[in-house]
Amino acid sequence: MGLFGSKNSVLPGFGPALGYTIFYLSIIVLIPLSALFFKTATLSWDDFILAVTAPRVVASYRITFGAALLAACVNAVFGVLTAWVLVRYSFPGKKLIDALVDLPFALPTAVAGITLASVYSPNGWLGSFLEPRGIKVAFTPLGILIAMVFIGLPFVVRTVQPVLEELDREVEEAASCLGANRWQTFCRVIFPTMLPAILTGFALAFARAVGEYGSIIFIAGNMPMVSEITPLLIITKLEQYDYAGATAIATVMLVASFVLLLSINLLQKWSRRFAE
Amino acid sequence: MHVAKGFHKNGGKDGSRVSEPAAVRFLLISAALAFLALFLLLPLTAVFVEAFAKGWEAYLAALHEPDTLSAIWLTLITAAICVPANLFFGIVAAWAIAKFSFRGKSLLITLIDLPFSVSPVVSGLIYVLIFGLQGWLGPWLQAHDIKIIFAVPGIVLATIFVTFPFVARELIPLMESQGRDEEEAALTLGASGLQTFFRVTFPNIKWGVLYGVILCNARAMGEFGAVSVVSGHVRGSTNTIPLQVEILYNEYSYAAAFAVASLLALLALVTLAIKTVAEWKIQQGMSINEGER
């Protein structure tokens, strides 16, 4: 029974274990992150606003958050489709495909970046096919979207998959007995059950895409105002020794990710309540 | 129950009750596979095709470059420090969180997950703000001739940050689901705390530990954004494999860049394979657990 009241356990080691956890968490994560806020606090309010609302910075928010939103939508649609196909149907190579869905988690972002850039470049496998038809992907905002779809791909699949697996088939049978056709059953019975999981996966994919750097910079072209993402702008400022500017933009990014994290937590709580 | 089973059979036969018509099924499977082929298989194949574009000998020569070898070496060292550090933390944190109840637990879990939602670039930046020349400790470090930023310690710190949650977030739910009955029984029978952990808890979580370690390792070896901010890109001394890939690519030595990248792609495939096995074993363990209850 300490400060935190570790009641009802005879197991040893609670004090040291919790102590070490908090200590390691503080020196690796909390103190370094707070450095960002302290550094930002040394800026005057006007300087801060000036740094985070400069036209080039605002253009980078628009492209970063806009492309991330679109990519999350693409992933929501194809994530549900993939999860559905993997859970409900059987086809040759299903196990392999299922394992491969996590590739974007395991493949280092720099590798993904140069590969996507070469596949979609004007003389690449897909680029040489798309370019003559007037679709430019590499070195345009469309390339950013492609990279973000790639890195966000597993999230919706992996959040929806377990929900579909647990879904009681008898409910669908009941719906069909009561006269619903398959499409009605899907829209009125299956989809509402999946919705919290879809939204959670959507938010996770969006959050990941907003912060992504490695897989995007190779394919983006990185033109200021057009295809420059916010994380890259932070690095550019750092390379120009504009620490204050970099810190101010990073603070905006960090606050955005806190807000996203909070909404993801709320969504997960909601889906758990839904499951019960 | 019997009736429901009968329905299921009927539904399966005419295909409309609980499944879709064969044509719809075929269409959905094709659409999903086309999407996955376009976004997963095609890039994965491209890495290896580009890597061997100039033949096997050029491939080997690219890997034998001194700068590349030193990048491989630095990556191995970084992973060898980060993975054990985060493994130890993960086990300790999971023990405290899963086996005891205390106030503020969900806040603590959220804070442990935090590095996942921070942009890699920001993860690197925070260490520059502390240890960089203009940072909190910068002047002191310079006076004592200690280099952290643009040197190996910075790379290690940034990598520990981005791989921080992997083991803990895998073990916490696993150990929570196993409860503490077995540990309590062991203690009652006279085992010491450490004996209880190594003989009772660890065998139960070993596949979870492997799962966390393998993902932590993949990220540690492949991290790019955070490391890129703190590394300073000194060839042959502060370049990890992903940074070496970037340099080669920007110098238009594509075949060499993809040759080095293929090492990381191979690592990713091995990671996925081990992860699949570990997942399967964890599920097996869980169903055995449920069977006993």
Image (cartoon, coloured by chain):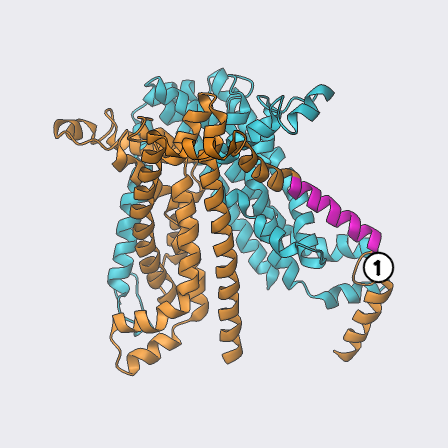
Chain colours: A cyan, B orange
Residue B16 point in image, percent of width and height: 84, 60
Q: Which residue lies furthest to the front in this view?
A: B57
Sort mark 1 into few (<14), some (14-19) or many (20+) by Cα contacts within 10 Å.
Answer: some
Q: In this view, does A133 lie above or below A114?
A: above
> Is B149 on the left or on the right of A74, as rendered?
left
Residue B173 point in image, percent of width and height: 45, 61
The residue under label 1 is A180
Query: For residue A146, which quarter of the picture?
Result: top right
Q: In this view, does B253 lie above or below B165?
A: above
Amino acid type, callout 1: Ala
> Is A29 on the left or on the right of B263, as rendered?
left
Q: Magenta segment, principal secondary structure?
A: helix
The residue under the point 43% across, 44% down is B116
Residue A203 vs residue A239, the one in the foreground: A239
Residue B278 point in image, percent of width and height: 48, 60
> Is A171 on the left or on the right of A13, as rendered?
right
The residue under the point 38% across, 22% down is A48
Residue B238 vs residue B192, the one in the foreground: B238
Residue A72 point in image, percent of width and height: 60, 38
Chain holding disc 1 = A
The residue under the point 57% across, 59% down is A273
In magenta, the rendered stretch is B21-37
Q: Does the magenta stretch include residue B28?
A: yes
Q: Is residue A229 above or below residue A21?
A: above
Query: For residue B211, which quarter of the picture?
Result: bottom left
Q: Can residue B235 be seen in this view?
A: yes
